[in-house]
Image (cartoon, rainbow, N blue to C red):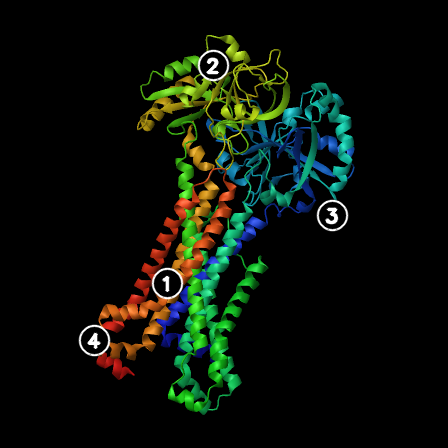
Amino acid sequence: MQNFSYAIRVLLRNKFYSFLNIFGLAVGLAVAIIILLYVQNDMSFDKHHEKYDQIYRVESKFRIPPKDDEFALSSFVIAEMMKEEYPEIQNFARFMGAGRQLFRIGDKNIYQDNLYFADSSTFSMFTHEFIEGNPKTALVEPRSIVLTETAAKRIFGNADAMGQLIETDANNIKVTGIIKDLPDNVHLTFEGLISMTTITSGQPVPTSDQKAGQLWNVSLYSYVMLPKNYDVKDIYNKFPDFFEKYMKPLVLQAGLGDAGFSPRLMPLADIHFNSKVQYDLPTGNLTYTRAFTAIGIFILLLASINYMNLATARATNRSKEVGVRKVLGSSRGKLRGQFLSESVIITFFSLMLAILIVNILIHGTNLNTLLGKDLQLNFFDNPLLLFGSLSVAVIIGLFSGIYPAFYLSAISVLVAMKGSVKSGPKSVFLRKVLVAFQFFISIAVVITTLLMNNQIDFLRNKDLGFNKDNVVLIPLQDTSIVNRMEFIKAELTQNPNIVGVTDAFGVGRGGGNVGNSLLGAGRRLLSISDNESNITQDTYNVLTVGKDYFKTMDIEIVEGRDFDENMPTDITQGVIVNQAVVDLMGWTDPIGQTVSPIGLPEPTKVIGVVKDFNAFSLHVKVEPTAIYRYQLQNAGAQGLPTLMVHVSEGAVGPTVKFLESKFSELDPNHPFEYEFLDQQAEALYRGDQRQNKLTGILSYICILISCLGLLGLSSFTTATRIKEIGVRKVLGATVPQLVFMIFKDIMILVLIGFVLAAPAAYWLINDWLDVFAYRMNLQEVILLAAGMSGVLALVISFLTVSFHSLKAANQNPVKALRYE
């Protein structure tokens, strides 16, 4: 208690240094706590399920030489058939996207997203807390739905949702359960699960042959549950027999040669970081998580270095105090205990302030929205957070207290009473190394942030090969609208602000498309001819579109022609491909080549070639793509299309009002909804933009902590050189010369940090850019980014040092000399 009260007096005696020490370390600790919570959240995806270590997602790997395709989706029947074949599979559950549905409750109409059809076994495999309903029976009966707490409240308000009927376009469904909202760290999120029997009831039970025929079509997410510590290689070793029995006959029948299939059992907890397959749900990026962890550690190091630097630098000013204490009988051990306990107590003040800062950021700001997380500061349920925070505070306190505790306690009473204790050359050198290290970290983070900004701007401004601006997407909700499509297009194009109107499948929220496709591209098995008219089968991207698609979307036709409405065979037997198909096949003359879905009476022929366009995000290269009219049988069009309206620049607002008015007449049974294609494009890079924002914020924090440390050290350095400043001023030195004299040493440290930071930042950003198929020219921008960061570091450090050096240089030299 005595040490505690004395530590308080020491803090109050030097308020300026106390503030810098405590606040700087508190900021570093606060950042470290937030990043620890962030990383814990990322690394614990799906681990709240009690049986997570027994659950595996069944992924699909198709082998059609010379290429392999891997999908997160699997066939409707494979999990069920594998359970019948392999007794070690204890259970299975499937999730099939139910799209966006209009819920009608009395006079209330609500669009509901995040819906899946799911098996009744879902709640025996996955852990969900039921507020109402029975988890064993909730999804047994057809036309049953289980809602999350938030969805139930949004749909029914304060009324009891349990047992209520919801009218949809297809049928009426009954609420049979309410569950707690899902945590944010799950890979498959939903707000409602509809019983799978809603789809299968009333349908004849498929025969074994019919089931086998479905194994090659992927449509949903399947999960199986295996015994604890089961080796999945056992199933892989057995699967060739399954393939020969159920899948090989179709290969032989279709003449697919060496085509094959194998399942991949992905552990549930590994999906977030390790899944790199097509048509997956949004997944995490381990590189990002590691980068944030590294930056968090560096910021904590910066704050700790500041704290230790200031603590050791100020310690020499307490030599007289040590002498007095020794005269009064304090032993060396007691002095060491005093200095160490003081240091630890101060770090605990910083920890308390850090906890307050984190609480304010989590509960008083939009931090969780920025992070895309639901972070909670709960020490009692998080032992790593509790003991980790305490341990870091104790370690920093002990390390920063070691120097004064052991060095000052060892000096003689005579030396101490004279007050002639000075920092040795080794101590000064170490302090300079630590300051240079601070600038190395800060400058590297700033350069990295600037380069990330450049890459994001590059993605935003890159020509995608089609027009994404001012395109309004309107999901069509009724077949009667589709049947009147030409009439509707004619009505809309009468508006002078509407440049063009088309429609396509799988676009926007209404498309129900899975993956990162911007224009609704799906994968299909196609027959394709080479220059010698030999037919091979392979999977390609397929778009299914309506009339005037290329004209409306400004996609350039480089060879052949567009679909001609006056030529019926164009609609039923025509296909347009992108340049990537031509390059892949090496066609000398693409017009007339076969690119056809399997099973058509007459194969479709190429009538035109378009310039390559990015149907997916710029993380992936343009892939070979075939474009069909959706009236074509087997083209892959399912559900209802999305209307795409190209609006004149500057006329979006009034045109949207016009569209809303028109659709209230054309489709009065459905509320009008729309979105913009450019916003969909922005969403593809939301994760990259979030990382860029976070890195930018952390770079500001790096600069702040470095400045706090530099402010304290410059104050101490100036105070120790006050006599030298006075003598130089008497001898004729000007104020700028004196300021530069003090700043010169810091400038050298900044330049050393810069020289080390530039190549480190180049290496880091080069690694980060690997996730993009299209990237900026790093060599062109690295010099500019590095130069800006170096100049910024010099300016900030100069302004920080000038705060004290100007004051010292401008004071009366008589006072400076008398001071000594």
Q: Which of pointers 2 and 4 lies earlier in the amino acid sequence?
A: 2
Q: Which amino acid type is marked by label 4? A: Gly
Numbered mark located on residue 563 in the image: 2
Numbered mark located on residue 229 in the image: 3
Q: Which amino acid type is marked by label 1? A: Cys
The residue tagged with tag 2: helix, strand or loop? loop
Residue positioned 36% across, 58% down in the render: 793
State the separation of the CA atoms marked 4 and 3. 81 Å
Pointers 4 and 3 in contact (C-beta within 8 Å): no
Q: Is residue 505 above or below residue 21?
A: above
Q: Please identify, in this view, whether the residue under mark 4 or under mark 1 is nearer the observer.
A: 4
Q: Please identify, in this view, whether the residue under mark 4 or under mark 3 is nearer the observer.
A: 4
Q: Please identify, in this view, whether the residue under mark 2 or under mark 3 is nearer the observer.
A: 2
- Dot 1 corresponds to which residue? 707
Where residue 530 sits: x, y (%)? Answer: 59, 20
Pointers 1 and 2 in contact (C-beta within 8 Å): no
Q: Please identify, in this view, whether the residue under mark 2 or under mark 4 is nearer the observer.
A: 4
Q: Please identify, in this view, whether the residue under mark 1 or under mark 3 is nearer the observer.
A: 1
